Amino acid sequence: MIAAEVIARRLALAGVKEAYGIPGGEVLTFVNSLADAGIRFVLCKHENAGGFMAEGAYHASGAPGVLVATLGPGVANAVNVMANALQDRVPMLLITGCVDSSEAATYTHQVFDHGALLSCVTKATMTIADGAVDVMIDKALAIAMQDPPGPVHLDLPISVAHKEQKDPAYQIEKAMPLRGTPRVGESLETASKWLAEARRPIIIAGLEVLYQGAEEAVSAFVKTNSVPLITTYKAKGILDEEHPLSLGAAGLSPKADDLLLPLVSESDCIILAGYDPIEMRSGWKNPWPEDARVIEFSAVPNVHYMHHSRFEFIGDIGAGLEALTKCVTDLDIVVTDNSRPSPKVDDAVVLIQKKLASYFGAGLDDWGPRAVIDVARSVLPRNTVATVDSGAHRILLSQMWTCYTPRTLLQSTGLCTMGCALPMATGYKRLNPQTPVAAFMGDGCLEMVLGELATLRDSGLPVTVIVFVDESLALIELKQRKLNYQNVGVDFTGTDLAAVAEAMGGRGVTVDTRDSLVSAINESLDATTFTLIACIISRKAYDGLF
């Protein structure tokens, strides 16, 4: 096999079904080898969008995403999505072409140091070496998938790509590394006593739960120990958000924070399960007293210092929670529905749930952004996977969109990048075509990635694209007004987005009432191509909503 074939076959063995990107002359050998290995190459309109398609594919399949870019501008275009993958813990390989080192000594056209550019936004960057291709692709896959998962960059020199390699005698089957379970000892015993004695316990769960596959363990812990749960936006659905112990998600909403942060700070036992505060706003920095009883189960050590904990158990989050529950049981202090939460805490939790519903519940407006989300959640099937990009609409939707299972609301939470929802929905739908998929976008976000409607069209998939049209970067405009600044650089002339969708081979509908939105969504579910629903809302429509 040549080097490009070795890499492509290793990716196929890792479960990769599709790769995304834009081919250039420097990666043609590799793109050809992908096809030979049974991996579909999906042409996108921009490498950044291709990376988000790869992320969508990862969420759909569990296999690492693959983005392919040519040298120079192709690499530079991928920087944003690599940073996003690093912060959102997305395993991804960026495979790029490059000129040979001997050529780079005198040839400068489109040439710069790819590794130097990408080193701060990837877990590793390496140049494929002749004779070590199988070792290096295995290393790249292992690094991308191990705790914490993230992006790895591989530069493939033009001459190496088509050089014959020794046919590997075998493929190393790499199991996920064993994660430590907390040792029963003084620390765990003390933590279990705290939990057993607590009258106002609370658990906060985050994205590490997802990549460790600990969702069921968290859900079981909540139910067994009667502990109310707050999640980050990425972790929504770990517990069915209709469950009486669910307090929904937090991250960016001041209204939600005003209710949830006091509950956290007054808790007498706080359990953190895979909680990475990279998703949270500044109000969540050290949100509890220094002497608070905080027990943390984490995939990696706390080096961010956004919060502190009295006990920090590093390793298997699910096994850690199970060990804590068992230790409580062994103490013969049995937790029952009658013993915890106390009536006072029950009342406090119910009151917060009612207040959250009054802010973010159903039927609140005849029309506007809350009505759009309310209608969409009621009409779209329960198993719909939603994607959302950054802006005022994301904050509101992340609070209002009910998740019944994990991984059903996908977004950029660490980096909060615009324009991710459409390509992420495309990548997910391509790998799971039977699952209903809806992308929620601001009009400013959509106009950043309009070309990817053509990618969605070429995929022939019926994704529902719901756009909040207010002809403004609403979140930034809101911040300008709060600071008494001038209105600068946030408003723009409207585009007939429905007409654009029609021109690009999809279906386009403009709506401004609940009834028309209901009809448009129902029709989109029966369509054979994508449907773009432009929801016309007023400027400043988000004032006071989150």
Image: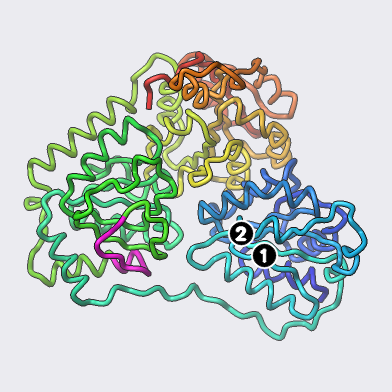
Give x and y (percent) for residue 47.
71, 46
- Asked if the magenta segment contains residue 453, the reply would be no
* Residue 520 placement (x, y as % from top left): 54, 22
The residue lying at 35 percent from left, 32 percent from top is: 254
Badge 1 amino acid: Thr
Q: Are marks 2 and 1 in contact (CB under 8 Å)?
A: yes
Residue drawn at x 67%, y 66% is 12
Above or below residue 14? Residue 207 is: above
Q: Position of residue 124 (x, y in %)?
A: 62, 65
Q: Which range of residues does the magenta coloring cover? A: 308-320
Q: Residue furthest bottom?
A: 169
Residue 453 is left or right of residue 179, and the answer is right
Q: In which quadrant of the rendered view does residue 328 lie?
A: bottom left
Taking the magenta stretch, the answer to whether it contains residue 313 is: yes
- The residue to which callout 2 is attached is 122
Which element is circle 2 on?
Answer: loop
- State the CA–CA distance, disc 2 to disc 1: 7 Å
The location of residue 485, given as percent across then percent down, is 51, 19
What is the three-letter code of the residue carrying label 2? Thr
Q: Crowding near pointer 2: few (<14 within 10 Å), some, many (20+)?
A: many
Snapshot quadrant of residue 351: top left
Q: Dot 1 corresponds to which residue?
A: 125
Going by the image, does 352 lie left or right of 69? Answer: left
Classed neighbour count for the residue bearing mark 1: other residues with Cα under 10 Å, few (<14), some (14–19), many (≥20): many
Q: How many marks?
A: 2
Whether residue 17 can be seen here: no
* Quadrant (top left/top right/bottom left/bottom right) for the N terminus: bottom right
- Colour mode of the rendering: rainbow
Please state, as top left, top right, bottom left or bottom right, where the C terminus lies in the image. Answer: top left
Element type at mark 1: strand
